[in-house]
Image: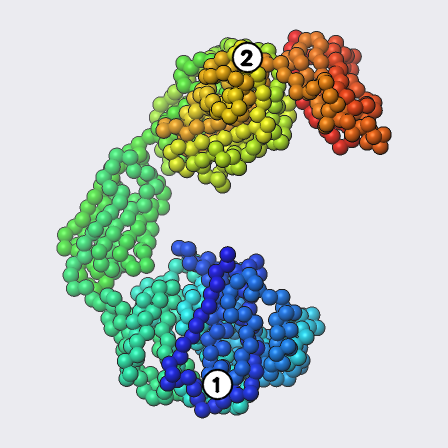
Amino acid sequence: MKKIKLIIVLFALTIVNLSAQSLAGVKICINPGHGGHDSNDREIPLGNGITFWESDGNLSKGLYLKTMLESLGATVVMSRVTNTTNDDLPLSQIVAIANTNNVDYFHSIHSNATGTATKSNYTLILFQGRTTAPTYSGSLSMANLLADNILATNRTTRKMIAGDFDFYGTGQAYLGVFKGLNMPGTLSEGSFHDYTPESWRLKNESYLKHEAWGIARSFLPYFITENFKEGIIAGIVRNKLETVPASYNPLSGTNDIYKTINNVKVTLEPGGRTYSGDSYNNGYYFFDHVAPGNYKVIVEVDKMKPDTASVNVKENESIFSDRMMMLNPILEPPKVVSYSPADSLEVSNLSPIEINFDIRMSSAETEQAFSISPAVTGSFKWDTDFKKLTFTPSKSYTPGVRYTVKISTLAKTYFGYYLESEKSFSFTTRSKLKLVSIYPTNGAADISTTVLIRIVFDKGINGTTLPQRVLFTDSLGIAVPIKVNQSQYSLGIIEFEPLVPLKNDAVYQIVLKEGIGDVEFVYLNQTYNIEFRTENSFTYQGYVINGFESENGWVPPLTSTNTKGINTSLTSFSILNTKPKSGSYSGRLDYTFNGKEGVIDLSMINPFPLGESSGVEIGVWVFGDASNNILEYRFIRGATNIEKVIIDTLNWTGWRLEKVEMGKLKGSGTIQFKSINVIQTVNGSASGRIFFDDLVSNFIADNISDDNLPDVYQLAQNYPNPFNPETTIKYSVPAEALNAASMQNVSIKVYDILGGEVATLVNEVKAPGNYQVKFNARHLVRSREMASGIYIYRMQAGKFVASKKLMLLK
């Protein structure tokens, strides 16, 4: 639901009649531009959840203007008085509102934007026609009045008046809000809402009301050549000693460089009228309906000296009295209230030094009072209120050295009071690069032949120090070709994996030599030798239930109701060709937990039936991430019971078949494989990346019924799988093929892993029914006998296409 913004402007009974002038009999249509925070609205995020929407500002101006004009006796027709999606009318409908009501004048209210890093803040008035030849002559007269009056209220840098033919360079009508109007019309872009100081001013209701006064001051002389008899006092209260953040990009030559003060209290004398400022970083104050004469503006701000200014108010004018506030003097010595780094043995070799004072300091004298021993070159920076001094070294400190920082009694406050006694503190820099962890560990056995070696240090790594200092060899000292992931160096992580699987039951060695360096120019001061042994050769007799060749069989973790405690923007599951165990693809799970009890659920869309046999095994090939989280499989037992089986701790990398016997499940009844789950542990990593491939089982399953005509095309998994030398493939042609027009040619072909055709098993039109065809591995491929490995068989019948893997194991 869109926020509805309705501003009710109340004027005291004594000032309902703004002047003796009257606009009785005049009918005006006001169009507050945009509406409803929709896609064509303009949003300016200002930080801390505060946002400016152009539609809000336009509506406020329009409602204030409506009240002013009606107080003069005019009839005002509004295109909208709330701010919902339904208020975002088509431009042609807005024109129709003006025409249907037969108004005397139409005006559309907007604010502008450059939409770029280059900022402007001027006032623009547009009308239909050429700049010197408007469609309605009254538009040009009104445009001149509007430009002068809005420039005077908003104090933009300049004014610009143009016809839409020329401004947009079309030579013809351009703005839809003017097309078809039966009366003069204008559009005002009062200021630029994407210029940050102006964005904050447009959050102030009095600032918006002031622009409405500028528009009202234009209508009165346009119709009756008269002016308002009262004036306005306004201004901006700023801190003379503080400047705005650089991100504001204040325009040169303006006071927007100075920081404004929130929650100001301004009193107008005589009369005792008070104005309480808002907290929207604009420092704005405003008094309207002020009779001509001399006044005093008294500004009060906490911890600042009171400020009083004299102003002379004239009728029909806005008089500005901007105030620059000064701190009340603090007549006491300063204190160092905190500092960093504190005394420590392990300070970063690039750590800045921060010193916080309780009183605003004089920068030059305090910087002179700062010293560090041993001497270090660097630069100083102060925060905006000059209470925090930061010293940043120009290069890293010397490793393993104790430094002492002193602030002498020459440090002085802005008000001239010196530090009473010297302040000193010390810290010690890091002396060496530390090896935090390594996988595999020294002496480890049964390591996957596809292992991902992961070395973690306590700081980001300087990659230029690694050549000839990180070695990976076999037992004979021969280097193993590897693929390196350099993207993790900045995190202090070195990752690499063999280009081809390692040998089974073989010894390999990782050497980390002294001299590996980090980004702070600290170095490893010893050499590490890590030796591990790979797993024995492994063969699994079973067949593939799901080969992770497409995402169609799986429920994405983000949509599963069983997934919880994750960062949704950093968690995803996809099928990719980057790391297949077999075939062309595998599933990749990237995850990040955001709590302590996270669960990731990767469920099958259709749970796979496994019967009731306790001798059945089922498993998934898993490429672990050494996260120490838990791998769990879930099953449906009987009709609805969910059985959870902890399979392993994810304390390895590389491909590993993680399987379980169905006899380990409790209870009785049929079993269905439901999902793969990753369970967060107390000591587990908060994030990781796991690959899955080939959900396999030794259970003989065939979902194709031989009794009745099938309803759909189906291709079953071959059996046996793995096979040697022969296997059977079942498939089905649906009943719809009884209609000759629906009959399709059915082809089943076998391909090698590179896509080369091995054999054509079926290639003909088939009547409805259930079929099977045998494939014998003694087929010759390009005059050579088929080799052991993974092959793909593919069925196509019209738009139906299905593929599955088969494995020849000799």
User: Is 504 situated above or below 606?
Assistant: above
Q: Residue at x 48, y 77 (%)?
A: 65
Depth order, front residue of 221/639: 639
Q: Is residue 576 something that shows in the picture?
A: no
Neighbor class of circle 1 (other Cα within 10 Å; few <14, some 14-19, many 20+) is many
Name the residue tied to disc 2: 613
Question: Of label 2 and label 1, which has the lower sequence position?
Answer: 1
Depth order, front residue of 351/565: 565
Mark 2 falls on what kind of element?
loop
Name the residue tied to disc 1: 72
The reply to whether the C-beta atoms of the residues labelled 2 and 1 are less than 8 Å apart is no
Quadrant housing residue 206: bottom left
User: How far across and down, in percent of the image, does residue 739 sit?
Assistant: 83, 30
Q: Residue at x 53, y 10 (%)?
A: 615
Mark 1 falls on what kind of element?
loop
User: How far across and down, in percent of the image, does residue 194 sit?
Assistant: 49, 63
Neighbor class of circle 2 (other Cα within 10 Å; few <14, some 14-19, many 20+) is some
**Which mark is drawn over residue 509?**
none
Quadrant housing residue 758: top right
Q: Amino acid at mark 1?
A: Leu
| Relative horizontal placement of residue 767, taking residue 2 as reference (left or right) | right
| Mark 2 vs mark 1: in front | 2
User: Is 740 situated above or below 337?
Assistant: above
Depth order, front residue of 525/32: 32
User: How far across and down, in percent of the image, does residue 472 sit?
Assistant: 48, 20
Q: Residue at x 33, y 83 (%)?
A: 311
State the scheme by which the image is colored. rainbow
Q: Outermost residue toward the left?
A: 420
Q: Residue at x 70, y 12 (%)?
A: 727
User: How far across and down, in percent of the image, does residue 200 sit?
Assistant: 42, 65
Q: Amino acid at mark 2?
A: Ser
